[in-house]
Image (tube, rainbow, N blue to C red):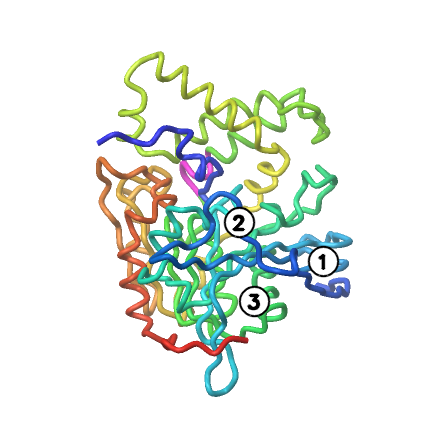
Amino acid sequence: MRFPTFQKLAVALSIATFGVVAPFTHTMAQTNAQPQKLTGSAALFAEGQSTEAKQADAYFDNYPFRSGEVIEKLRLHFATLGVPHRNAQGEIDNAVLVLHWTDASGGALLTPNYIKALFAPGRPLDASRYYLIFPDNVGHGLSSKPSDGLKAKFPNYGYNDMVDLQHKLVTETLGIKRLHAILGMSMGGMNAWQWAEAYPDAMDGIMPVVALPTKISGRNLLWRRIVIEGIRTDPDWKNGNYDLPPAGWLKGYAVLRMMIDGVQHLQAEIPNGAAADRIMAELHEQASSIDANDTLYALKSSGDYDPEPNLTAIKTKVLALNFGDDEFNPERVHLLGRLLSKVHDGHAVVQPGSDRSFGHLTMAHPELWAHHVADFMRELGDNPKKERQSE
């Protein structure tokens, strides 16, 4: 089998894993008066029909982060697919929150491979049946982030802040009391674990993909420290006020990409020195397009993540999916099974690696694991009805 090149894996070039507060006000604005088709192929195409993603922004004035720092105006960008359905009590009952990985955005989940595998008609999260919500986490995508202008003066945020804002988006902006499901990849999967603990009655189930419910450690922690140190100690970083991408970041990115890719994939892609040189050039180009401050903040934001102490308190259904060739969350250390044994209604699946998989980056190829999503949605029950009552 011929593997996709690194450039064709651009959808996954951003990586995964993976007191008293000031008052604030909240507003929301549509980015366009009419829904507009996303660039690329961010619409669902099947049997001559298309469903367009709607783009919007929620704004929070004088928003306080858990660090105690306040941002004057926080923008949280999000997209939605599908139409909300209301039950007999008038409450939305078909909402599914879909969460992206580190340094990515909701747009990374609206690419053709995700759409065809998960959101198209007849697929596990069919957008004609479910109301799908794709937020850009703070620090990512079109939401407020350091590269917008504040650079190193941007407030420090953590994963708990991300979940706080996701919850505000769901409950306050969109008026949803209970989610049908949460699907998250890597960092998004870690956020899903946090939701299950912080809001135990707010969803029917969560499906974390390549996300262990314990504090980040081992290789996952080490590469974060390597990249952070590479950025901060580079003379060109200038305390975040750099003019060109720091060389430490450009070099660290290659290490980062190597760690999250599959061993078999890399073996096939790099048979000789010329191939290694070509891929190094591609990685340099990719890293140059990513803001080092945004990555620095995104990586250090995982420091407050540790759901392990409260796993026994989780009430919702859980299906945790990992991949056997994921070197970030290596199955041979047997963490996932041990941790899931603490969850009352939890189930772990480790999909074996193969010559078609990409290690941790298999998350960016949902066609390889969509059947597990289908199994999980069936387990949650076919809550959405065939006939839809639009808002």
**Residue 292 place in picture, x, y as percent:** 61, 32
Please name the amino acid that badge 1 sits on.
Answer: Pro
- Quarter holding the C terminus is bottom right
Q: Is residue 145 left or right of residue 267?
A: right
Name the residue beneath numbered marker 3: 170
**Nearer-N-terminus badge (1/2):** 2
What segment is highlighted magenta in the picture?
Answer: 217-222
Determine contact: label 3, label 2, CB under 8 Å.
no
Tell me which corner region of the image, top left, top right, bottom left or bottom right, holds residue 122.
Answer: bottom left
Q: Residue at x 52, y 84 (%)?
A: 90
- Circle 2 packing at 10 Å, graded few (<14), some (14-19), many (20+), is some
Task: Give the residue pinned by disc 1.
Answer: 64
Q: Please, what is the three-letter code of the amino acid marked with disc 3?
A: Val
Q: Is residue 347 visible?
A: yes
Q: Secondary structure at mark 1?
A: strand
Please tell me in which quadrant of the rendered image residue 290 appears.
top right
